[in-house]
């Protein structure tokens, strides 16, 4: 069977499940997937039809009756019929053949009711009638009621004998609750003609490079966690410790992606489900190009996989030669600086924002010897402390971070690095350590005057932590797992580079 996946047609075995459709697609396990049901199935299930006549269009809403079910089965015969007669009471389209039994019972009809009738009590001459006023009469059909005209009722007064019923179209809304299934169940069985989206494709707005980079940073693992959900929008507030400049402001259409640039919630990424006017506190950052069905149903706590156009351009962590191949593949030129040898590790790139890199056409990659990039491991038991460390070093948004040495002296039992006093106000005391081990990484917490200072212990101690504070003033955040001998040679005001070892 044929199924469309992320806009591309795939041939799958009959009875295939969602797990077969997602193979080879951009998808983070556990994320939402949207399934648009096939047109054929929707035609079977819809309860609204457009009746296109030569004088205008009416909408028919079906009732839950045998007549309504018969309507769906004889549609090909009804289409193309003409107005056979029109009186003060009814307008009749036909005729066509059915197997409706005869019934001469007088029935009550309301204005705008649609029903079957038999001409001369003969089901070889079956008609569709629409009541133009309330009345009671026998029209000879044992199966009668179909539904009711809900829109375009003025057309009944305009059509005359000979006007044609040109087209009958099921009304299918792409986002209606009847035709979209959103699920994480990879065992969901698919049918012919289904359309599947495993991710949300966002086209980034070139006028807001910083806001676009915020989307790329929050979605750096290929997914976004939904923290906020309302009828109007969904949002991700996972990175509010950020400064966003004032950029482009546009009307927030359905599918608009914006980033808050000021006030409470600065840095929040929002995707809109309803149209709202432009706001000076929301930068236009992108537009959902595909996968809106996922957006329409996502709730707080859900995860959505994202793709962006363009994809993130970040060479940090690669070697200079790897960076050259990476950038060349994107049509960009590389300008090497720092250590330029092929095996040098890239620790910075200029510009570091994707959209600015695209517009410039050239990216400067700053290299250092690979032995100057040290491995660390972070302890996730205190998320606020790890968040602070990643923000200060830059590990929050790239794979290699940096620390500037504040105090280093030969023979000292520790080395300290500059932090950020303002950001570190949220570094509350942990349980005091009983012994600080060689290689432990710590932060001075807000109970001490120099809160925010970062340090690495070079010798074991029961009395002092990595920044020289007593246990109650120290929060341990991780370990230095590289050669401490090389670290002890670092001079004051020198920058060191760190990379997380996630083993």
Image (tube, rainbow, N blue to C red):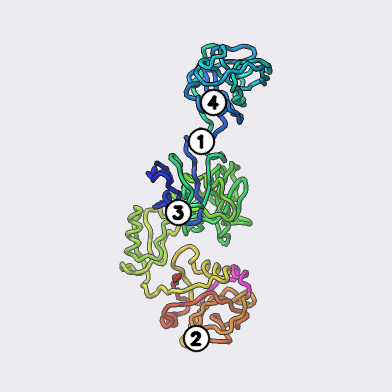
Task: Identify the residue at horizontal 61%, vertical 29% (top origin).
Answer: 63
Q: Which mark is residue 459?
A: 2
Badge 4 local density, few (<14 within 10 Å), some, or many (20+)? many
Badge 3 local density, few (<14 within 10 Å), some, or many (20+)? many
Give the quarter of the image for residue 341.
Answer: bottom left
Q: How far across and how far down the image is residue 202, in percent?
A: 48, 48
The magenta segment:
416-428
SS state under label 4: helix
Q: Which residue is mark 3?
A: 27
Marks 3/1: CA–CA distance: 27 Å
Q: How far across and how far down the image is residue 96, in percent?
A: 50, 18
Marks 4/1: CA–CA distance: 15 Å
Task: Identify the residue at horizontal 49%, vertical 42% (top origin).
Answer: 36
Q: Nearer the viewer, mark 3 or mark 2?
A: 3
Marks 2/4: CA–CA distance: 85 Å
| Badge 4 or badge 1: first in the primary sequence | 1
Disc 4 + disc 1, Cβ < 8 Å: no
| Badge 3 or badge 2: first in the primary sequence | 3
Q: Which mark is residue 71?
A: 4
Q: Which mark is residue 42?
A: 1
Does the rendering let one see residue 160? no
| Badge 2 or badge 4: first in the primary sequence | 4
Give the quarter of the image for residue 365.
Answer: bottom left
User: Does 296 appear above or below 503?
Assistant: above
| Badge 3 or badge 1: first in the primary sequence | 3
SS state under label 3: loop
Q: Nearer the viewer, mark 1 or mark 2?
A: 1
Marks 3/2: CA–CA distance: 45 Å
| Badge 1 or badge 2: first in the primary sequence | 1
Depth check, front residue: 15 or 30: 15
Marks 3/4: CA–CA distance: 42 Å
């Amino acid at each position: 069977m044929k199924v469309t996946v992320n806009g591309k047609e795939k041939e799958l075995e009959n009875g295939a499940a969602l797990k077969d459709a997602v193979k080879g697609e951009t998808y983070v396990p556990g994320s939402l997937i949207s399934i648009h049901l096939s047109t054929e199935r929707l035609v079977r299930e819809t309860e609204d039809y457009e009746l296109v006549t030569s004088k205008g269009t009416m909408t028919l809403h079906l009732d839950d009756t045998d007549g309504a079910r018969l309507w769906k089965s004889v549609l090909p015969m009804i289409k193309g019929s003409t107005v056979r007669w029109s009186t003060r009471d009814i307008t009749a389209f036909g005729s066509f053949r059915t197997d409706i039994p005869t019934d001469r019972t007088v029935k009550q009809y309301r204005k705008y009711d649609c029903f079957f009738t038999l001409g001369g009590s003969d089901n070889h001459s079956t008609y569709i009638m629409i009541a133009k006023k309330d009345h009671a009469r026998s029209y000879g059909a044992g199966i009668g009621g179909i539904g009711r005209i809900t829109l375009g009722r003025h057309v009944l007064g305009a059509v005359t004998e000979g006007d044609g019923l040109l087209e009958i179209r099921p009304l299918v809304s792409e986002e209606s609750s009847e035709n979209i299934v959103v699920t994480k169940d990879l065992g969901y069985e698919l049918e012919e003609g289904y359309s599947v989206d495993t991710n949300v494709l966002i086209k980034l707005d070139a006028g807001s490079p910083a806001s676009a980079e915020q989307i790329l940073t929050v979605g750096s693992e290929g997914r976004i966690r939904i923290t906020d959900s309302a009828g109007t929008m969904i949002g991700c507030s996972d990175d509010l410790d950020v400064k966003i400049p004032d950029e482009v402001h546009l009307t927030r259409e359905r599918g608009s992606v914006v980033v808050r640039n000021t006030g409470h919630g600065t840095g929040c990424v929002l995707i809109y489900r309803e149209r709202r006017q432009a706001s000076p506190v929301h930068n236009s950052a992108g537009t959902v190009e595909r996968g809106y069905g996922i957006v329409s149903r996502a709730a707080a706590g859900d995860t959505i996989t994202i793709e962006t156009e363009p994809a993130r351009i970040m060479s940090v962590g690669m070697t200079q030669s790897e960076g050259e191949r990476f950038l060349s593949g994107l049509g960009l030129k590389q300008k090497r600086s720092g250590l330029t040898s092929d095996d040098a590790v890239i620790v910075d790139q200029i510009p570091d924002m994707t959209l600015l890199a695209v517009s410039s056409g050239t990216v400067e990659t700053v290299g250092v010897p690979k032995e100057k990039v040290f491995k660390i491991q972070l302890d996730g038991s205190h998320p606020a402390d790890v968040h602070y460390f990643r923000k200060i070093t830059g590990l929050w948004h790239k794979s290699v971070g940096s620390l500037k040495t504040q105090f280093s002296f030969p023979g000292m039992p520790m080395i300290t690095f500059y932090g950020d006093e303002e950001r570190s106000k949220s570094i509350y005391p942990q349980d005091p350590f009983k012994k600080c081990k060689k290689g432990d990484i710590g932060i001075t917490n807000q109970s001490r005057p120099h809160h925010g200072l970062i340090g690495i212990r070079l010798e074991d101690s029961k009395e002092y932590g990595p920044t020289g504070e007593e246990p109650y003033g120290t929060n341990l955040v991780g370990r230095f797992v590289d050669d401490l001998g090389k670290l002890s040679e670092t001079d004051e005001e020198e920058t060191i580079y760190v990379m997380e070892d996630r083993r």
